[in-house]
Amino acid sequence: MSVRVVQSGIGHTGTTPLANLIHGLVAPDSPVKFGDKNIKNEIITKTHTADVDKLMKMHPEYELYFVMAERVDEKVNVRINDKHRSYKNVLVIDYGEILETPEWGVEDIADNLFTKLFKFLPREIIPNPVAGSFRMATRLRNMNARYEEIKHKPFSYYDPFYHIHGSHRGRGDELLNIKLDMGEPMYKRRDE
C-alpha cells in the first residue's frame, strides 16, 4: 500500500510553514500541493479538511499519515478533537512548535519537527534522514525569504512552490474560534 502524508489544519494554525517543513524532510524539491484531490498524485498534500475519517474513507487504497496543526491562544482557538488525536496515524503539532521567535529559531523548529516526524512517518519515505533537519530548516528559510519578496503584494498574488500568498501573514482573524469536534460546527466566528 502506498504511503501518503496529509498535512491538515484550519487556516491561521501554521499550516503553510508546517507543510513546507514536511516537504523539506520528505520531498524537498517538490511544491506544496493543496486540496484533497491531490492525495492520489502527491506523496504530501496540504488540506484544510480536518475530518480524518472522511479522508480515510475517500482514499482506502493509501496508507494515510496525518500531520495536523492546532493553535490555542488569545487570537485563535483551534483544537484537534480527542478522537482523531488518539489515532496512531495522526500527529498533532501545536502552533507554538512552528512559530519562529527570538527564543525559538528556525533550527529549533526544524530539529523538533524532525524528531517527531522521524518517529511518526515510515522510514521508507524519508530520503537521507541524516540531512533531514538541515533540509527542513533550509526549506523554511527559503519560504520565509520568498515571503519577504512578496509580502507587500495583494493576497491574490500566489507562489505555487511554497503555497504562500502576498499579504499571507497577519490577515483577518474572522474565523478563528474553531472547534473540530464531531457534530459541532467546524467554523465559528470569534465573537459567537
Image (tube, rainbow, N blue to C red):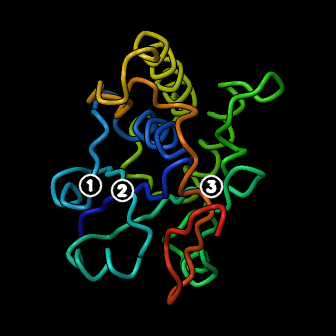
Percent of width and height locating residue 93: 62, 55
Q: Residues within 10 Å of mark 2 (few under 14, many from 20)?
A: many
The residue where tag 1 is placed is 35
Kindly give the residue lying farthest to the bottom in the view shown.
183
Q: Nearer the viewer, mark 1 or mark 3?
A: 1
- The amino acid sitting under disc 2 is Thr
Kindly give the residue lying farthest to the right in the view shown.
103
Q: Nearer the viewer, mark 2 or mark 3?
A: 2
The answer to whether residue 146 is above or below residue 11 is: above
Percent of width and height locating residue 113: 62, 43
Kindly give the residue lying farthest to the top in the view shown.
149
- The amino acid sitting under disc 1 is Gly
Along the line of sight, which residue is nearer the eye, 54 or 78? Answer: 78
SS for callout 3: strand
> In which quadrant of the rendered view does residue 56 lie?
bottom left
Mark 1 and mark 3 residues within 8 Å of each other at the beta carbon: no
What is the C-alpha distance between the residues marked 2 and 1? 5 Å
- The amino acid sitting under disc 3 is Ile
The residue where tag 3 is placed is 93
The answer to whether residue 12 is above or below residue 164 is: below
> In which quadrant of the rendered view does residue 104 lie?
top right
The residue where tag 2 is placed is 47
Residue 110 tag number:
none
Along the line of sight, which residue is nearer the eye, 57 or 173? Answer: 173
Along the line of sight, which residue is nearer the eye, 38 or 192? Answer: 192
